[in-house]
Amino acid sequence: MAKLTGIPEVCYTALHRVRETALIDFGSLFTPERKIWTARNLQRHHEMFVQRFDEGEGTFLDKYRHQLDGGDDDTIQLAAELVYVQQIFTTVTGPKKKIANVREILTWCDRAVEVPEWAVEGAAGHAGDQSFNQHRPWHLAWINEYLLHWHELPESRRFQLLGNPWEFRDDVFGHKTSLQAFQPMREAWLYIAFPGTFENISSRKDKKAIRAGFGHLLPNGTTDNIDRDLLTIREALGKEAEPGFHFYRKPFIQQWKEPKDAKPKKQTGGNAPKAGPGLSTGDAPAVMASLEDLAASLMLEPADTLSRWAALLVEKGQVILQGPPGTGKTFIARKMAESLAGTTDRVTLVQFHPSYAYEDFVEGFRPSGPNHFEVKDGPLKRLTARAAAEPDARFVLIIDEINRGNIAKVFGELLFLLEYRDEAITLQYSEAPFRLPRNLLIIGTMNTADRSIALLDMALRRRFRFIDLVPGEPPIDGLLKRFLEANAPDMVYLAAMIDSVNEIVGDRHASIGPSHFLTDDPRALTEEWAKQIWNHSVIPALADRFFDNPSEMDQFLYDTVRDQVTSDDVLADQAEADDASADAD
């Protein structure tokens, strides 16, 4: 099968070197002139590590050093190279942290050993799986015992297995090990040895779900070999899909992965939103149900978020969504407006800016010929006329970045109508009575990181309901994590990175929002893409915040934050992998 999209070529080069070293020449990943992966060194490592397995408290590296105490340099170097191999599959641990772990073990040697550049560059990883952190000792024990078994095979048998991935798979699954929680490592081992045949999937549970989701593509039904079934499915999908597609990416993931409790909550009794002006009792339930479906599709929690906001909007007539950049204010406003109006044709969006005036927004004189001017309606007056002509329909005006305009200048006498919609006033230019119909709803958006909000007219504040969209708070708390879990599970660490940065910033109005990393393009969800967005979107936003203290910016560099959020401590108590015993296909 084709190499997977988004995985750098250097990562495949690293896999090839691991296969050559561990299964063929038994040399060394880091010092090719030495024989490190020998049966003798593997047996010595087994005696010191597996036979003295430590499930007590403490970090993995602290316990590992104690277990290897007294070992010779070859055994310790083998331990470092084994840890490199155990980490090579996962993307949960960052590349720098992986190499730091390996280098820490190498310092226990008396001789100096450097990690070669190819190994550093090839450490990025192939798939996300937290068990490669949490169950590292059990994974290492499995690799150790499988390789001891491998050395016991005749050389002719080893080469026979290396020439046939399916026989190799049978040998891997036929090997019995002394410890548990090894299943993900065993699945990853197949991919490490044959990345052109086996999927980069370490969860047997996910493999079963994928086969079930695409079972219709198996002409003869399922077999007793789930990996062969997955290859058949990939080949069938590959006739139309781009080469190197991921089962963990759109559009494929939606066909097999069950969403996490995405069902919207029902509104009943006293919690049900009431119909208000412009939202009749008859259609309120349908609209609210639609809004709950919309909230679920946008991954906003709780699911009744938009229906509660809609209740505020129809009660007051106008609301402002406020929050720092990147929280999806405009996007959510447009989606909510379209749902309430029932069609995009009844939604108008304008954006305020310092030069925007009453004449642009409401009405004003405009040239209509040589030496002639006439009063022209602005977007507000045009939408108002349509709303008045269709009283049974809803119209929504979105004012993006409402705080960037001179509110008193732009709204003029309309500030009065925002509060008294049933009354009429005379406009400045047309001198005609004018009302704001109740079926015209107004949604504003406001960037709270903008210093101009301090100048926001208090009269305007009184006439709007304000809704916060702030990272770390509902409804967008955890949104990026939910998005990545559904679309790119191997990149969930991005959510932890944003949370870490926001904790350092310590200002809810200057926090980094999730929308920087929300994309509809499944091909874009790679670490290379994430770095690009970080460097050209997140960093500039933070640079403005720390303009007077540029030295503070070092702590926000992508690799620095990536390493900080990596949870690399192994759990003290053994926790079974979710499918550690699910050996049957």
Image (cartoon, rainbow, N blue to C red):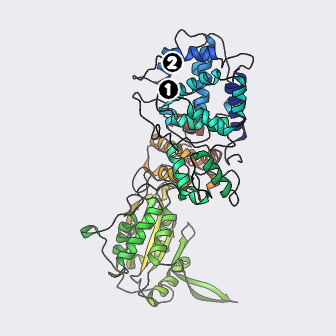
* Foreground residue among 97 and 21: 21
Label 1: which residue? Answer: 137
Q: Mark 2 touching mark 1, by CB under 8 A?
A: yes
* Foreground residue among 251 and 114: 251
Left or right, residue 56 beside residue 338: left
Quarter of the image for residue 29 reads: top right
Secondary structure of the residue carrying tag 2 is helix
Badge 1: few (under 14), some or many (20 or more) residues near its Cα, within 10 Å? many
Badge 2: few (under 14), some or many (20 or more) residues near its Cα, within 10 Å? many
Q: Residue at x 65, y 36 (%)?
A: 167
Residue 429 to residue 492: above or below:
below
Q: Residue at x 55, y 79 (%)?
A: 359
Q: Residue at x 66, y 14 (%)?
A: 112
**Residue 346 visible (yes or no):** yes
**Residue 456 visible (yes or no):** no
Q: Amino acid at mark 1?
A: Pro
Tell me which numbered mark, 2 or 1, is placed earlier along the sequence: 2
Quarter of the image for residue 193 reads: top right
Residue 107 spot, x, y in % from top left: 59, 16
Label 2: which residue? Answer: 49
* Foreground residue among 409 and 505: 505
Residue 510 spot, x, y in % from top left: 48, 49
Residue 553 to residue 373: above or below:
above
Residue 182 spot, x, y in % from top left: 50, 32
Between the residue at mark 2 and the residue at mark 1, the CA separation in whole angstroms equals 9 Å
Q: Amino acid at mark 2?
A: Phe
Residue 447 to residue 184: above or below:
below
Residue 255 to residue 496: above or below:
below
Left or right, residue 3 beside residue 253: right
Quarter of the image for residue 43 reads: top right
